[in-house]
Amino acid sequence: MQLSWIGADLRFSYCTEHDLPEISRMLAKESVCRWLFFGPNTEEETRSYFLPLIEEIQEALAEGRTPEDHVFTIRLKHSGEFVGQCALLPVDFSPGSYLIGYQLDDTCWRRGYGTLACTFLVYFAFTVLGGYRLNGDTVADNTASRRVMERCGFVQEGVQRQYWHAGGGYYDRVIFGLLASDLAPERLSRLGETFTAA
Ligand SMILES: CC(C)(COP(=O)(O)OP(=O)(O)OC[C@H]1O[C@@H](n2cnc3c(N)ncnc32)[C@H](O)[C@@H]1OP(=O)(O)O)[C@@H](O)C(=O)NCCC(=O)NCCS
């Protein structure tokens, strides 16, 4: 199976253990974790979350199977500079339905990379994996994340009030969804032209 894809300025590669120091540095930042229900994280916490996912991915790839989990490291295509990570995680008991996630380092915000990362997840889930549904959620105040999903065609499906209780505050959870059938066939084929084998 292919390991890397290129879209515009970015390269998306299946995550390996070598990426963990940079992912850990990003997830140790207050700025990045401001609207996440976890973090800021120690390096140990980040490693213990990501390592089992990376092991599952690398084992599947080594055996020529499609992994269950899809965690990608995002880098600038020319310099290899670290930009962030994004992921598709399977929803239990619903083959073809995935939870999306993305976190970018704060040095790379507001350049359209969040939207490009989410667009890559849409492309990957519907075109490469043949999935039928994507699920996203965010703290209501996380305007950037909401905009990213809206720009990628996600529909707001509900609000769970005071879903998260963290740092002494209560936070509403806004739920988004996107069905493959929401996208016109031409849009799906345009996605296939945006991302190419690295
Ligand atoms: C959410 C995140 C991925 C957005 O990445 P980004 O590269 O800055 O996003 P883009 O440049 O593609 O911008 C997307 C939209 O968000 C808006 N936006 C970006 N940062 C914003 C901010 N701090 N406040 C308000 N709007 C913001 C942009 O203006 C754009 O909106 P527009 O279409 O109306 O112009 C990034 O901020 C991030 O990694 N945050 C920390 C981790 C996180 O919260 N992840 C999501 C968890 S649900």
Image (cartoon, rainbow, N blue to C red):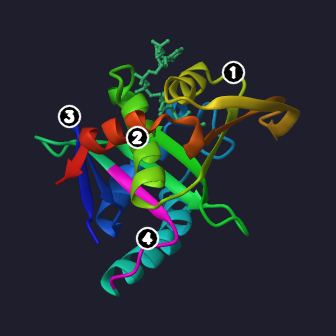
Which badge, 1 or 2, is on the more N-terminal residue?
1
Which badge, 2 or 3, is on the more N-terminal residue?
3
Label 1 to label 4: alpha-carbon separation = 31 Å
Assign the N terminus to one quadrant of the image. bottom left
Residue 157, x across and y down, in percent: 76, 32
- What amino acid is labelled 1 in the image? Asp
- Residue drawn where x is 47% and y is 44% of the image: 122
Which badge, 3 or 1, is on the more N-terminal residue?
3
| Mark linked to residue 141 | 1
On screen, 113 above or below 17?
A: above
Which badge, 2 or 4, is on the more N-terminal residue?
4
Q: Which residues are magenta?
A: 64-73
Label 3 to label 1: alpha-carbon separation = 28 Å
On screen, 85 above or below 119?
A: below
Q: Is mark 4 within 8 Å of ligand 1?
A: no
Residue 110, x across and y down, in percent: 38, 19
Assign the C terminus to one quadrant of the image. bottom left
* Image side of residue 109 versus residue 160, left or right: left
Q: Quadrant of residue 90?
A: bottom right
Mark 4 = which residue?
Answer: 54
Mark 2 = which residue?
Answer: 188
- What amino acid is labelled 4 in the image? Ile
**Circles 3 and 1: CB atoms closer than 8 Å:** no
Q: Quadrant of residue 105?
A: top left
Q: Marks 3 and 1: which is nearer the front? A: 3
Label 1 to label 2: alpha-carbon separation = 30 Å
Which badge, 1 or 4, is on the more N-terminal residue?
4
Which badge, 3 or 4, is on the more N-terminal residue?
3
Mark 3 = which residue?
Answer: 9
Q: Marks 2 and 3: which is nearer the front? A: 2
Label 3 to label 4: alpha-carbon separation = 24 Å
Q: Marks 2 and 4: which is nearer the front? A: 2
